[in-house]
Each structure stands twice: as C-alpha cells, then as structure tokens.
Image (cartoon, rainbow, N blue to C red):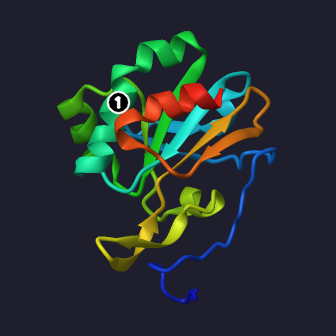
C-alpha cells in the first residue's frame, strides 16, 4: 500500500508492457546536459534502471555493459542508464569504471515512476522503497520490444543480445 503524501513511497502504479509506447522524458546526464529519449528516435535503446552508483551489483552490471559496449553498438543498440543519483555521483562512477555510455540523473524518481520501476522491493530481507532493477529495450519507433525485470548483473549484455 502506498502513501502518496510521502515522496519516498511509490507514487505511480504504471504497469508498462511489451508493445507499449515508451514514455518520453528529458533529464540531465552526468555532465548536466539535457538528454531526451526523443533524441534517440530511429535507434534501438537499452534503457536500464539501476538502484545506486558504486554499489556491488550496480557496478557489476555497468561494467558488464561497458565490456560489451562495442558489440552492443555494432548491433545498433544505444545504452542509457538511469538511477536516482545526482550528476556528480554519475561523473564519479563513470570515471572510476570508464563507462562509455551516459547515466541520467533521476533525483525525484519521476522517470522511474513513468516506467513503473519505483516502488517496494525486498533488499537483504527487508522491505525498501527504490528502483526495481529493470531494462527496457525500445525499438527505433519508440515501442518497448522487451522488458527485462530479472536482470543478471554479471551477464546483462547477453540478456540484451538475447532480447533483440
């Protein structure tokens, strides 16, 4: 049950599914530059939501995407990461791990709400509120082709390859 008066609780009960139009958004990347999903019309996008920069699972996932980035690009897939972290945190995370793709700051979890990935989750046996690790494969026409909600952080690139 959510309490919409508390900004830390889920505020949007969106349930996107494959075949839906991907919600458009504009936010800032690690450099403070505006980045919009509309800018990627005509390209296939792997839009991945992750909980927090520099945590073990998120680092493993980002490094797996980094290590396979050339192959993802060769298959025409643009990678965009989104978390509630700020631009400064993203810059540090990118620098530390030499990440070749943009990370989008979603401070108020508005984009996560649009995609239905902000909400209750179990972490270390406790109920928490935050990002549910999820990747949306969005085709060239802005349609969600595949939703990966059981992300394998060590092998996420392969999940994306298998999805396309």
Q: Please, is residue 120 above or below residue 143 in the view? A: below
Q: Which residue is mark 1?
A: 64
Label 1, residues with CA under 10 Å away: few <14, some 14-19, many ≥20? some
Q: Residue furthest left?
A: 96
Residue that appears at 34% across and 54% down: 85
Q: Quadrant of the N terminus?
A: bottom right
- Report x, y in % for residue 103: 41, 39
Residue that appears at 34% across and 53% down: 86
Residue that appears at 63% across and 48% down: 25
The one nearer the camera, 37 or 45, is: 45
Q: Please, is residue 49 above or below residue 12 in the view? A: above
141 vs 101, left or right, is right
99 vs 163, left or right, is left
Kindly indicate the quadrant of the structure image that contains residue 66: top left
Mark 1, secondary structure of its residue: helix
- Report x, y in % for residue 164: 65, 26
The one nearer the camera, 83 or 35, is: 83
Residue that appears at 55% across and 89% down: 3
């Amino acid at each position: 049950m959510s309490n919409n008066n508390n900004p830390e609780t889920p505020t949007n009960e969106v349930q996107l599914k494959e075949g839906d139009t991907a919600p458009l958004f504009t936010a800032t990347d690690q450099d403070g530059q505006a980045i919009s999903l509309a800018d990627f019309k005509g390209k296939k996008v792997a839009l991945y939501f992750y909980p927090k920069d520099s945590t073990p699972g998120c680092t493993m996932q980002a490094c797996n995407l980094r290590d396979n980035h050339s192959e993802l690009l060769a298959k025409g897939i643009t990678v965009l990461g989104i978390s509630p972290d700020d631009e400064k945190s993203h810059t540090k995370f990118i620098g530390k791990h030499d990440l070749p793709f943009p990370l989008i700051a979603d401070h108020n979890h508005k984009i996560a709400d649009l995609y239905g990935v902000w909400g209750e989750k179990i972490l270390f046996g406790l109920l928490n509120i935050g990002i549910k690790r999820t990747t949306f494969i969005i085709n060239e026409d802005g349609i969600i082709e595949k939703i990966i909600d059981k992300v394998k952080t060590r092998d996420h690139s392969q999940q994306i390859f298998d999805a396309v």
